[in-house]
């Protein structure tokens, strides 16, 4: 069997290249745009920078304890997060699922399932409620 190399992080996008984040969950969309050193929502109201930065760190930089190759569990999906560049073109979308064991699964179309522990729900709770 040939050797395979996979990116353990949720996406190959650099947080420095992200101008806007689109979070889709439960039929709703939230937009957050970078304005110099702060993040604002779709109405121009300043968002909690720490929450946005925590989400970026989790999805773009944090390596999961476990990685598996397989089909993404669409039935368990709770959200998608799309990263847009400074031209507002999509850079990548990370699909997020929560399995029955309480593990969070990140996948960006490459059939690499990045399995994170239940504790990461603290980061998502601010955006999914």
Image (tube, rainbow, N blue to C red):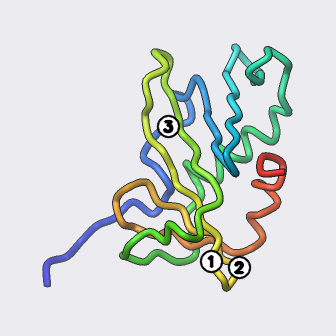
Nearer the observer: mark 3 or 2; the answer is: 2
* Real-space CA distance between mark 1 and mark 3, rounded to the nearest whole angstrom: 27 Å
Q: Which residue is mark 2?
A: 102
Q: Is residue 29 above or below residue 65?
A: above
For residue 14, the mark is: 3
For residue 1, the mark is: none
Occupied quadrant, residue 104: bottom right
Residue 41 percent across, percent down from the top left: 77, 24
- How dense is the environment of label 2, judged by Cα within 10 Å: few (below 14), some, or many (20 and up)? some
Work out whether residue 28 or residue 115 is closer to the camera in this orientation and state it.
28
Q: Which residue is mark 1?
A: 99
Q: Could you tell me which residue is drawn at 77 percent across and 51 percent down?
A: 128
Q: Could you tell me which residue is drawn at 39 percent across and 67 percent down?
A: 112
Q: Are marks 2 and 1 in contact (CB under 8 Å)?
A: yes
Occupied quadrant, residue 42: top right
Q: Could you tell me which residue is drawn at 79 percent across and 14 percent down?
A: 44
Q: Secondary structure at mark 1?
A: loop
């Amino acid at each position: 069997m040939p050797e395979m190399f996979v990116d353990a992080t949720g996406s190959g996008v650099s947080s420095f290249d992200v101008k806007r984040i689109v979070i889709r969950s439960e039929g709703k969309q939230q937009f957050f745009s970078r304005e110099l050193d702060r993040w604002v929502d779709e109405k121009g109201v300043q968002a909690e920078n720490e929450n946005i930065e925590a989400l970026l760190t989790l999805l773009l930089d944090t390596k999961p304890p476990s990685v598996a190759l397989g089909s993404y569990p669409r039935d368990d999906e709770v959200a998608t997060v799309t990263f847009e560049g400074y031209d507002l073109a999509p850079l990548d979308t990370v699909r997020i699922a929560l399995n029955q064991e309480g593990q969070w699964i990140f996948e960006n179309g490459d059939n690499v399932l990045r399995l994170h522990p239940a504790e990461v729900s603290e980061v998502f709770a601010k955006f999914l409620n």
